[in-house]
Amino acid sequence: MKSNKPRVAIQGIRASFHEEAAFKYFGENIQTIECGSFKQTFDALQNGEADYVVMAIENSIAGSILPNYSLLLNYNFPVVGEVYLPIQLHLMALPGVAFEDVKYVTSHPIAIRQCIDFFDEYPHLKIVESSDTAACAKRIRDEELTDTVAIANTLAAKLYGLDVLERRIESNKKNFTRFLILTHHENVVKGSANKSSLCFQVSNQVGSLAKVLNIFATHSVNMSKIQSMPVLGKPNEYNFYVDVEWEETKQYDIAIKQILKYTHNFNILGEYARHEEPGMVEKPLNVTTEKPARKYIKIKKLEVQSERPGVGKSEEGK
């Protein structure tokens, strides 16, 4: 009997940030399809093994995930939605493990770098890089590692039965990742769109791109994102990936018709409702130059040599 649950392909394993993003968009009543790479998620959709793909496209600290733009164009699956996920990183271990007994910390290298302020306080900890945050939490449970902690989300701690020793250890508390939702063309449901993702090329002449952008401005269409990628094998030619938003659909339609005159290889990758939630737009705050003190776990620090041990390869040579 076929399940009514949407099958959602993600890069990584269960309890990863991709699954958390899928839960935020679809709800938790889904069937997660674990994939080893972003390309494999598109293959799962193409082969009928999944109904949707949830794919990270940019992070407010790390920037754009450039290879994923090429996947959008190469597979031509429509974008039907987006979701922004706050990246909150927690330190977790097996139940009963005391922090002072921990020797190793493991996670994805980007997650580790985002927590560098925390680990500067504990230089005796050896950093072990891995390919996935949730996989690190799972490994601790599967191998019953009592000397290792993982950096992951609360979803991983819950699924793999770990205790959170310290919450929110990331240095930047306003870090978000944007995820795109893709599906088959026949699954697209026409709705009230106010955002679109476009891809096009322009001639290599003075003002070519400016003409296109001015058309958007003239018709009150806001460009919220632009990313250029070289066209393979064609020097000085670029694909421009552009996200635009609008209030009046008529103005958007007029703008699209006009920019067709100044572009080639034009593609609408998807038209969808932009993600909105309370807190995404920041209110003005009183600025203070004094950084508040961070309270960390209190343990007896170990004596260390002058050379910092166990630093991952990505941290060497800095």
Image: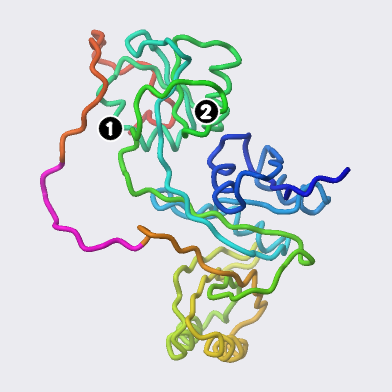
Q: Residues within 10 Å of mark 1 (few under 14, many from 20)?
A: some
Three-letter amino acid code at disc 2? Lys
Q: Residue at x 55, y 43 (%)?
A: 20
Comparing 206 with 287, the one in front is 287
Disc 1, SS: helix
**Res. 30 image quadrant:** top right
**Res. 134 image quadrant:** top right
**Would you say 193 lies left or right of 165 here?**
right
Our reading of the magenta stretch's main secondary structure is: loop
**Would you say 288 lies left or right of 22 here?**
left
**Res. 181 image quadrant:** bottom right
The outermost residue toward the right is 1
Disc 2, SS: helix
User: N-terminal of the two: label 1 or label 2?
Assistant: 1
Q: Is residue 227 above or below residue 172?
A: below
Q: Residue at x 69, y 46 (%)?
A: 9
Measure the C-alpha gap from mark 1 to mark 2.
25 Å
The magenta segment is: 281-291
- Numbered circle sitting on residue 117: 1
Image coords of residue 55 (percent x, y): 60, 51
- Numbered circle sitting on residue 28: none
- Numbered circle sitting on residue 158: 2
**Would you say 101 lies left or right of 271 here?**
left
